[in-house]
Image (cartoon, helix red, strand yellow):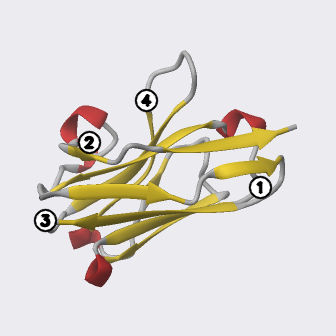
Amino acid sequence: QVQVAESGGGLVPAGGSLRLSCKTSGRTFHTMAWFRQAPGKEREFVAGNRRSDGHSFSYADSVRGRFTMSRDSAENAVYLQMNLLKVEDTAVYYCAATARRLITSTTRLASEYDSWGRGTQVTVSS
């Protein structure tokens, strides 16, 4: 059975940090990503990685330089270190995965991922 589970969300003041974890089981995933969804907004790409790219990660412009994604292929896990958090980072954060090696132009599309966690709430207070 395929399982994807996020953890590490919480309430943090602006300027603070959080580290999200995503653990998976039941399948080996090639492409993994973090998405987020704020109330009343569409789900948006945050960061992603393809196993074949090694330690090369892609980021949304809004988080580049503040967030760092990492991957432990042996553990089938990904992490998201979030620093200098802003109020606008408040959202439910989701881990997404697919066994396919997505082409670069599609890694930011939520519709390309077939396995999702339930999400973890991140709230940044002013």
Label 2 sits on what residue type?
Answer: Ser
Q: Which residue is mark 1?
A: 84
Query: Mark 3 and mark 4: span between their CA atoms?
Result: 24 Å
Task: Answer whether labels 4 and 1 touch (C-beta < 8 Å).
Answer: no
Residue at (18%, 43%) from the top-left corner? 114
| Few, some or many residues within 10 Å of mark 1 (<14, 14–19, 20+) | some
Front: mark 3 or 1: 3
Tell me where residue 33 appears, x and y as whole percent: 36, 53
Q: Residue extending furthest front?
A: 1
Viewed as shown, does residue 105 lie left or right of 68? left
Query: Mark 4 and mark 1: span between their CA atoms?
Result: 21 Å
Numbered mark located on residue 124 in the image: none
Q: Which residue is mark 2?
A: 105
Determine whether the residue tagged by mark 1 lies in a helix, strand or loop: loop
Determine whether the residue tagged by mark 2 lies in a helix, strand or loop: helix
Query: Mark 3 and mark 1: span between their CA atoms?
Result: 34 Å
Mark sitting earlier along the chain (2/4): 4
Task: Answer whether labels 3 and 4 touch (C-beta < 8 Å).
Answer: no
Q: Is residue 55 above or below residue 118?
A: below
Front: mark 3 or 2: 3
Label 3 sits on what residue type?
Answer: Arg
Mark sitting earlier along the chain (3/1): 3
Residue at (88%, 37%) from the top-left corner? 126
Determine whether the residue tagged by mark 4 lies in a helix, strand or loop: loop
Q: Is residue 55 above or below residue 93?
A: below
